[in-house]
Image (cartoon, helix red, strand yellow):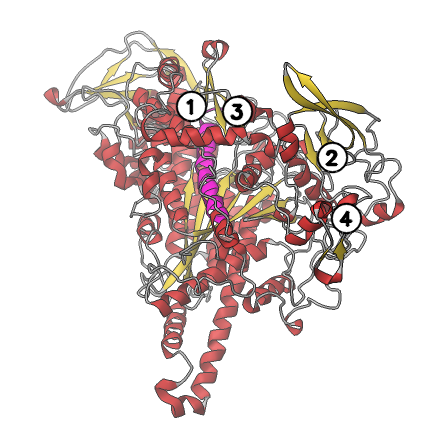
Amino acid sequence: MELGAHVWLRSDASQWGWVPAVITGKEDSKLGGLDVINLTLRDDPYFEGNANVPSHAQHHIGRTASGYYADQEQFEVVVTVDPEQLKTADHEDVKLRNLPASYQLAGEDPEAGVIASPSTRVDDQVVGGVDDLIGLTHLHEPAILHALRLRYDADIIYTATGPILIAVNPFKPMGLYSDDMMEMYRVQGEHGIGAPQEAGKTGSGYTPFKRRNKIKMRAGGKDKRLPPHVYQTADDAYRAMIRGMENSRLMGSSSQPRTPQQRSMQRGQSRLQVVQYETPTNQSILVSGESGAGKTVTTKIVLNYFAMLSKKRSQDETDLMNQSMSSPMLSRFGNSSRIDESAASSALEDANASVASALPDDVSIEQQVLQSNPILESFGNARTLRNDNSSRFGKFIEIRFSSTGTLAGASVETYLLEKVRVVHRSEGERNYHIFYELLSGGLNKEERRQLLIDGRSPCEFKMTRSDGGTYGRRDGVVDRTTYGELRTAMETMGFDDDERMGVLGIAAGLLHLSNVEFAEVRAGGRTTTTTTTAGVSGGGHDRVVLDRNATPSLSAASELLGVSADDLERGLTTAVIEAGPAIRGDRVRTFLDLPRANKALEALLKGTYGALFDHLVKRVNGCISAKGGGGGGGNKREADAAQGDKGDDATKPASSNDRGAFIGVLDIFGFESFQCNSFEQLCINYCNESLQQQFNRFVFKLEQAEYEREGIQWRFIEFPDNQDVLDLIDRRHTGILSILDEKCLLASCTDNTFCDAMYAKCSTGGGIGGGSDGGAVALRSKFDSVAGAVSGSNDAGDSSSASTPFLASTTQRARGLFGIRHYAGPVEYDSAGFLEKNKDELPKEVGELLGGSSRPLLRLLAETVVAPQKQKSNKTLSPPPSAEDTLSELATPSPYRRNQHHHRSKASSSGGGGGVKKTMSSTSVGSQFRSQLKSLRTRVDSTSPHYVRCLKPNDDLLPDKFDPVVVADQLRCAGILEAVRVSRVGFPQRYVHERFVGRYGCLMMGGRELSGGRSVRV
């Protein structure tokens, strides 16, 4: 940092957090006996958006005046820096801006378009300077924010950052997803960089992105790729999979190491596809972001692109087969023909299988895969404060392709459905969409009459009632329209009218059930014990019964759920205690008080809805996976096999014997930190912490490969790791989730006793230290030492002074709170309700109530909930291995079934010992989620990953509004700044040779001719 350098200065007074400045003074000084340097910084009066911005800069940024820094007052500040920081340009509060005037090159500099000040040349071709932010010389938080803001202002929502595609939600139609746009990216992927002119509208000034002032972005010329787009990410994954299958056939097995020649970069090949010694055939696209960032829409865009590619491949194969069959050259050359007869035969078999298994209305597998979305959205999405169509569950969609690249099937695995939303919602939020769609008028009168909702509105049911009048959607989507899409999707997926009405009948029954009320009475019964009839314990205590006169919904709920009012009352207001084996068969029935009866009702609502959602997922899988595997399986493949058995295939490397491959699309919840964070946020952040570790290790591989290509010695470089945080959460015996599982086994435990045990074990470092974890802690320390290199966050400094990521001050302990230093920053959790949420118990009486229903579908749901529990009743809870035990095995995936039926040995009754069983408790939520997460990590690690990070520009869900505080927070939570830290730990300044000479040419003893005939002289 020398005099005259243009920098970013951290400023709490600015809405941007950073302001443009110029170094005007530099003075050596002493501070506490140490040498320091005092830098004098003044405001940059010529930065764009300030009062004196030149007219040419105003034109190129597309506004008459941005106003971003118009309110910035003049300032002069002195910042004291360490001389070592000055050498490396590494300071928390001062960051170099890209390409100041004194080092500007007049040539084809990819950074020259960064509109940082009038001293930077404006490039019309690339808004923000580069399409890939890794190309910026100085990459840090203010540089990323500045480039994203410029591109967003120009209606450019996609930006690459190395292996990450950043997608900023525009909150308005963009016209970026037409058939022509898909064709452009398909042609580029098919033919490599610089697609043929006639293949797409990539010449004559045509560009897929338009700025407001009509400045054109880089188009697909013969030497440049199209601008970043989610289509490009999807296409990269698809082409890598195709190449993997081709290599498998050519080499006999993809398990054999590839030679450097075989790993050479092909035309149009992205950096991701050449950095690993052995690129897996199977691919994955990981889409993440917070609610409202556009994850669900991005996932649908990816699926649409895959469907288009599949249809195009299928059409090309059909044309090829028709040509080959009619060509006289085929018989002339026989076996020596260039036509791959085995591939043609395989394509023909696939086509025949597709025709044979098509639905009566000839629905294609592509249509079925796409039509699975409306079903999952209706039953799994809801309006929240942040998003009108928020997915309240995570999902991994496995798209299976045949050996010829056509779509063969798919399967969906879901994670952590937010069942609590069924009974509790924040003001300003809605329940799941399906309940409002039922009441929107989309059903015909006869159907509404059958569901007993004719003439009813959302305000008449507790599940949908809102004191603030939150019944519609802010995004303009109408529930009646979405119900029409749901009905079409069900028809496409093979639901007949009876099955459809059965599903809707359960949803309508839950609406009515939410309205039932209890009345307290004095119970004067006596206690009896018998082996044939249930005893009743009342003993003069208050008890509750269903109030049969309060609402007509009781009879409606009984009819729709297929249970009598008496059975419903017995299941919700009484509990049965079973004696142990010594007096087998004795049962004591006791009355519940009002709080426990309400808990039973909530458990029935949540359990039934959760089972219905799981059933729909299995039903969808049974349909879209029926044609999977390139001809295997058949239409009658069991839905649960689609859920559980695919885990084995997912981890197998592709080989010559495999007939296809898959691309997994992960749509997962982003990192969360609210005013009050509970058990759900702990699980979500644990998931993000684990995926961030996977991502960091993937970036490490990228860096390793790049250093080797450059001939740089890199083994001395330590890269950051967050293993200590994962150990704190999931380590066996001493991790937070393990402690929680142990306490859930004891009937006398409460949230307070759980906190006491957690404070005792985690505060001493027992959850993270010792043994092989020393390396992880050491890496963490290394990370802390460079944490300020990008964001300048004070959180990093706090972490470095702590020996453990666990936080629990005296004040926090008194309130049952604790904190964790996550990669995205510290988060405070409230332990209230942890035990109840982790158990997720379904009272035995409620399970028996469902099993006695006259409705076939409800009995089926009861079997999926009740049957496994009966086999688990005498087992002990044994948590699955933690990340510590399995990380070393991730590189060599092993089969692992995710279906909870395969984990029966790890479940237990939560009612304690002694043979007493009051509830039917499945594997704890935390334990089950750990199992799912371990399986997910294994599957992702067996693929070549591609990353999409969705950001929302503001919390108001408004177009054309860029809030830097909101975006900066998401950059941290999405792991983007963390990725930059990882990639810049070793060599933070990355100049291309020409720019390096231009930057440091003054140190040369003479002139040196540069490319293009230009020279630099002293």
Q: Residue 368 versus residue 515: which sits nearer the camera?
A: 368
Q: Which mark is residue 702?
A: none
Q: Quadrant of residue 629?
A: bottom left
Question: Does the magenta portion include 683?
Answer: yes
Gap in angstroms between the C-alphas marked 2 and 1 = 82 Å
Task: Specify few, some or many for label 3: CA neighbours under 10 Å numbering under 14, 14-19, or 20 or more.
Answer: some
Magenta-tinted stretch: 677-703
Task: Specify few, some or many for label 1: CA neighbours under 10 Å numbering under 14, 14-19, or 20 or more.
Answer: some
Pointers 4 and 2 in contact (CB under 8 A)? no
The numbered mark, 3 or 1, whose residue comes first in the sequence reads: 1
How many discs mark residues in the rendered view? 4
Task: Specify few, some or many for label 4: CA neighbours under 10 Å numbering under 14, 14-19, or 20 or more.
Answer: few
Q: What secondary structure is found at the residue carrying circle 1?
A: loop
Amino acid type of the residue that numbered disc 2 sits on in the rendered structure: Glu
* Mark in front: 4 vs 3: 4
Side of 53 where 233 appears, left or right: left
Q: What residue sits right under mark 1 in the picture? A: 548
Q: What secondary structure is found at the residue carrying circle 4?
A: loop
Q: What residue sits right under mark 2 in the picture? A: 2
Residue 234, x across and y down, in percent:
53, 56
Gap in angstroms between the C-alphas marked 3 and 1 = 50 Å
